[in-house]
Image (tube, rainbow, N blue to C red):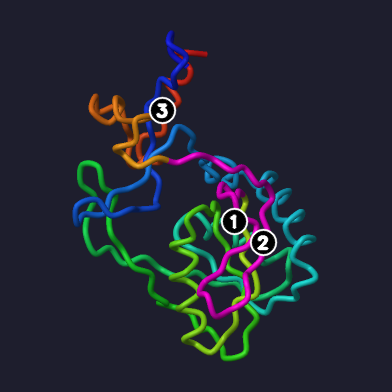
Amino acid sequence: MDTTGSPRGPLVGYAGQYEDGGNLRNYVGFVYYFVGRGDQWPHIAEHWAKSHAQLLASFEPDLLVAAPMGGISYASVLKQKVGCRGIFVEKKVLQTADIGKREKSKLVLGRYDIYAGDRVVLIEDIVNNFSTTKEMTDLVEVAGATVIAIASVINRSDMSSYWPSPERDPLPVIALQHRPTPQYRQDDPVVRRHIEAGNVVMKPKDQWSELVAVETAYA
């Protein structure tokens, strides 16, 4: 907080988007969870995966499908604990990032196969807007498999289930931690002054050391 009691920033960009005058803009917020800083360490990834496998045991999945890039490393450890196959989908970039906007991309099933009848759990490091989840669900179901749950290290949404479409049953979100975290449009009064001042990092993973330095300076 600054001297007025307002968050001092910088803001960070989130993957979720909204339409603004015909353009897509990314939501922003004051908190960023960088799961990759934890699961790079074997003992941390093992601890998380062991706990997660216990939560997933009753689902009896045939396959874990990881989202790029955050879910890939973690899923490689988790599949060992769950004892099933594990693959990942790949991201194809359609448009590079620009000021106020992150890159546009789509998910593709590249080097792996999904078999008809597979019971699938989707793996993500963090879930919130479920845009990636919806795209992954579509890829899985086109192959004739069934998504039975979503597993994430952190769920920063306010939901414990996700509906891919109105016609189907909700998918349970099995998270190690549920941390509902506010996000804002870039024209929201809460964040407008930060946006106007350029006090925003749209791709925080690429500038993580700078964010840490700011936090350390005010600690």
Q: Amino acid at mark 1?
A: Tyr
Instruction: Give the answer, above or below, for where 189 lies relative to 78.
Output: above
User: What predominant SS class does the magenta segment belong to?
Assistant: loop
The answer to whether residue 135 is left or right of residue 160 is left
> Badge 3: few (under 14), some or many (20 or more) residues near its Cα, within 10 Å?
some
* Distance from the alpha carbon under mark 1 to that under mark 2: 6 Å
Between discs 2 and 3, the one toward the N terminus: 2
> Badge 1: few (under 14), some or many (20 or more) residues near its Cα, within 10 Å?
many
Label 3: state its secondary structure: helix
Of all residues shown, which one is farthest toward the top? 3
Residue 211 spot, x, y in % from top left: 41, 28
> Badge 2: few (under 14), some or many (20 or more) residues near its Cα, within 10 Å?
many
Instruction: Give the answer, above or below, for where 122 lies relative to 190.
Output: below
Residue at the disc numbered 1: 74
Q: Which residues are magenta?
A: 154-183
* Distance from the alpha carbon under mark 2 to that under mark 3: 29 Å
Residue at 33% of width from left, 53% of height from top? 18
Q: Amino acid at mark 2?
A: Leu
Residue 125 spot, x, y in % from top left: 55, 53
Residue at 74% of width from left, 65% of height from top? 56
Mark nearer the viewer, 2 or 3: 3
Residue 157 spot, x, y in % from top left: 56, 50
Disc ID at residue 211: 3
The answer to whether residue 55 is left or right of residue 198 is right
Residue 41 spot, x, y in % from top left: 61, 43
Q: Quadrant of residue 168?
A: bottom right
Label 1: state its secondary structure: helix
Disc 1 vs disc 2: Cβ atoms closer than 8 Å? Answer: yes
Between discs 1 and 3, the one toward the N terminus: 1
- Judge by depth and name the residue closer to the eye, 58 or 36: 58
Residue at the disc numbered 2: 78
